[in-house]
Structure formats: structure tokens, C-alpha cells
Image: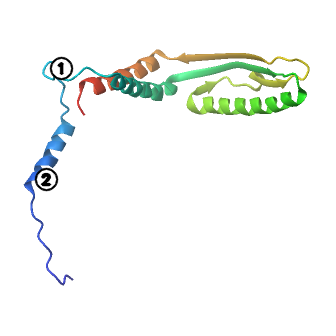
């Protein structure tokens, strides 16, 4: 039930034309013609932005294809003082647990056995010792896919207008 008449909307031709131009620009990317443009050469900040964009795409695609095999991680924690050794042992144990969980969540961590990781406090010696074997592998398809995505981002940023 309507008690009063509604106002008729006025048609604004200028706004309508602007919307059409925006839709055309989005649907049809224009390839830049470097010979016609008189643009100054790229600055260092432009190059840094380009490199960071490409690296962000690279590092987003890489963990999906990267396989990590943690063969062994043996850490002997030692300092001259027994109390310092105990404190450092707790810190190292927590850091290693977080590191292993981070590797497992980001990449494909495999061959993780309880014997392959050991953290031992040594109250008698003065120097700590670390023995780590980590193998990183990537399939050829994964490498080509990751590099292809990075190359596509470079082409999109460098040669095609948004």
C-alpha cells in the first residue's frame, strides 16, 4: 500500500557512459605499445615493487610442490652453567617443536620418525652441537608450474595494462 507517489529517477547519460567504459577496459586488456608512449624509465622503487610481486607469487606456489624430508635433527644443548643449560634446553625444545609443525603445515614433510629428532641437554660440556640433515625436492612439473606462474605475473605486470 503506497500513500504517496514515488519520484521518477532521472537518467544520467554521463554516468552510464563512464560505467560502459570501465566495463570495456576490464574485459579487454590493452597491450602497451612502448614505441608510442613517452614514459620515463622505470625507477628503482618500481623495479622493487615488480620483483616483490613476482616473488610473492613464486613463494605462494612453491610450498605446494616442495617436498621436505627431515632425515635427522640431533641437538646437544650445553653451556658452562647447569642452570643456563636447562633454560636453553627448554627454549630449544619449544623452538624445534614449533619449527617442525610449521614445516609440516606449510610443505609436504615426510619421513618424520621419533628417532630422527633428538634434543639432549649436556651438563658437563661447554659447547653445543647441532647435526641436521634435511632434503628438499621438487618435481619437474612443480618447478615448471611455479616458474610459469611467476612468468605469467611478470608479463601481466610489465606488458598488460590493468
The residue labelled by disc 2 is 15
The quarter of the picture where the N terminus appears is bottom left
Please name the residue shown 50% across and 27% down the image.
64
Q: In this rendering, would 111 be left or right of 66?
A: right
**Res. 29 image quadrant:** top left
Crowd tier of the residue under label 1, counting other residues whose Cα lies within 10 Å: few below 14, some 14–19, many 20 or above: few
Q: In this rendering, would 87 be left or right of 35?
A: right
In the foreground, 112 or 14 = 14
**Res. 10 image quadrant:** bottom left
The colour scheme of the drawn protein is: rainbow
Locate residue 88, reporting x and y percent: 80, 29
Please name the residue shown 63% across and 20% down the image.
69
Which of disc 1 and disc 2 is earlier in sequence?
2
Q: Give me the disc on residue 56.
A: none
Task: Tell me how far mark 2 sits from mark 1, CA to CA.
Answer: 31 Å
The residue labelled by disc 1 is 34
Please name the residue shown 29% across and 21% down the image.
42
Asked if 42 appears above or below 19 in the picture, the reply is above
**Res. 90 image quadrant:** top right
In the foreground, 145 or 53 = 53
The quarter of the picture where the C terminus appears is top left
Amino acid at each position: 500500500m503506497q500513500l504517496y507517489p514515488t519520484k521518477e529517477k532521472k537518467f544520467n547519460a554521463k554516468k552510464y557512459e563512464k560505467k560502459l567504459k570501465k566495463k570495456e577496459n576490464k574485459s579487454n586488456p590493452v597491450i602497451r605499445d612502448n614505441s608510442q608512449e613517452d614514459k620515463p624509465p622505470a625507477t628503482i622503487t618500481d623495479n622493487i615493487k615488480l620483483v616483490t610481486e613476482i616473488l610473492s607469487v613464486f613463494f605462494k606456489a612453491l610450498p605446494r610442490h616442495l617436498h621436505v624430508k627431515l632425515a635427522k635433527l640431533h641437538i646437544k644443548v650445553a653451556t658452562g652453567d647447569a642452570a643456563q643449560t636447562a633454560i636453553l634446553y627448554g627454549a630449544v625444545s619449544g623452538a624445534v617443536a614449533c619449527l617442525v609443525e610449521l614445516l609440516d603445515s606449510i610443505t609436504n614433510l615426510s619421513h618424520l620418525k621419533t628417532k630422527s629428532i633428538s634434543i639432549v641437554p649436556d651438563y658437563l660440556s661447554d659447547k653445543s652441537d647441532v647435526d641436521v640433515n634435511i632434503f628438499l625436492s621438487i618435481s619437474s612439473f612443480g618447478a615448471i608450474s611455479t616458474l610459469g606462474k611467476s612468468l605469467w605475473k611478470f608479463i601481466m605486470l610489465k606488458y598488460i595494462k590493468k
